[in-house]
């Protein structure tokens, strides 16, 4: 049976408990021993772990507010390129003027915080990624979107759509992830797609 996220959308990914094999793969992906991993929150279509769900407090007691963490290098590199292109500035600007977008971003933030607090309340409302008012780390937002499926985190959804268009669809990104145009007006979507693929006017 297909899982569905909080918005009722069918999830494109599979998720589940973490095995020793998974942990070994994640260690190779990150180049370090993973800590506090609770589950593989998203597997890429080719089976590789893509996002891990991490305990709010690491084994040594260190608070770790980032619930979902991007691990697959294909995803981290592609998202890093988006950040380097300066796309977050425009996304933050849109949050100031697009009330429906800002409202859904707030819903995503509240969902993220509630899910983390259900595991352990760290006594902070900080979640990462800039939520709920800004866009500061697309890695956090894309990880959240991939873990929960499209329809919850609008900025994360867009980031995943953008990297899907760079050749990752069907390998590192679910083949059925919505196109950017499904999240954005056509003119804005075309502009960002050009940025993601390295095209220039």
Image: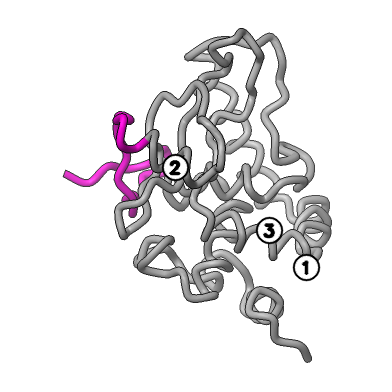
- Front disc: 3 or 2: 3
Question: Mark 3 sits on what residue?
Answer: 80
Quadrant housing residue 160: bottom right
Residue, x 63% and y 73% (percent of image)? Answer: 185
Q: Secondary structure at mark 2?
A: helix
Spatial CA span between label 3 and label 2: 18 Å
Residue, x 57% and y 16% (percent of image)? Answer: 58
Region in magenta? 1-22
Q: Position of residue 69 (x, y in %)?
A: 55, 38
* Crowdedness near tag 3: few (<14), some (14–19) or many (≥20) residues, C-alpha within 10 Å: some
Residue, x 79% and y 44% (percent of image)? Answer: 134
Spatial CA span between label 1 and label 2: 24 Å
Of pointers 1 and 2, the one earlier in the residue sequence: 1
Quadrant housing residue 187: bottom right
Q: Nearer the viewer, residue 156 or 133?
A: 156
Q: Is residue 9 magenta?
A: yes
Query: Residue 134 has which mark?
Result: none
Query: Residue 85 has which mark?
Result: 1
* Image quadrant containing the N terminus: top left
Residue, x 55% and y 29% (percent of image)? Answer: 67
Q: Position of residue 85 (x, y in %)?
A: 78, 68
Q: Secondary structure at mark 1?
A: loop
Spatial CA span between label 3 and label 1: 9 Å
Tell me whether circle 1 and circle 2 mark residues in contact (CB < 8 Å): no
Of pointers 3 and 1, the one earlier in the residue sequence: 3
Q: Position of residue 50 (x, y in %)?
A: 44, 48
Question: Mark 2 sits on what residue?
Answer: 147
Q: Is residue 92 above or below residue 165?
A: above
Task: Please indicate whether residue 170 sits to the left or right of residue 114 in the image.
Answer: left
Q: Position of residue 57 (x, y in %)?
A: 58, 14
* Crowdedness near tag 1: few (<14), some (14–19) or many (≥20) residues, C-alpha within 10 Å: some
Q: Secondary structure at mark 3?
A: helix
């Amino acid at each position: 049976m297909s899982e569905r996220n909080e918005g009722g959308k069918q999830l494109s990914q599979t998720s589940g408990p973490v095995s020793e094999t998974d942990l070994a793969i994640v260690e190779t992906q990150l180049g370090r021993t993973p800590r506090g991993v609770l589950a593989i929150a998203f597997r890429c279509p080719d089976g590789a772990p893509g996002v891990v769900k991490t305990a709010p407090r690491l084994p040594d007691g260190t608070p770790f507010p980032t619930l979902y963490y991007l691990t697959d290098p294909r995803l981290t590199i592609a998202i890093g390129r988006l950040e380097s292109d300066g796309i977050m500035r425009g996304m933050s600007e849109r949050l100031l003027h697009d009330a429906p977008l800002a409202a859904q971003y707030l819903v995503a933030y509240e969902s993220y915080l509630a899910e983390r607090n259900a595991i352990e309340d760290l006594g902070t409302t900080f979640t990462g990624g800039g939520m709920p008012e800004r866009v500061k780390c697309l890695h956090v937002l894309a990880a959240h979107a991939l873990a929960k499926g499209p329809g919850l985190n609008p900025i994360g959804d867009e980031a995943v759509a953008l990297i899907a268009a760079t050749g990752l669809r069907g390998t590192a990104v679910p083949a059925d992830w919505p196109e950017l145009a499904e999240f954005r007006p056509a003119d804005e979507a075309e502009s960002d797609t050009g940025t993601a693929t390295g095209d220039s006017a």
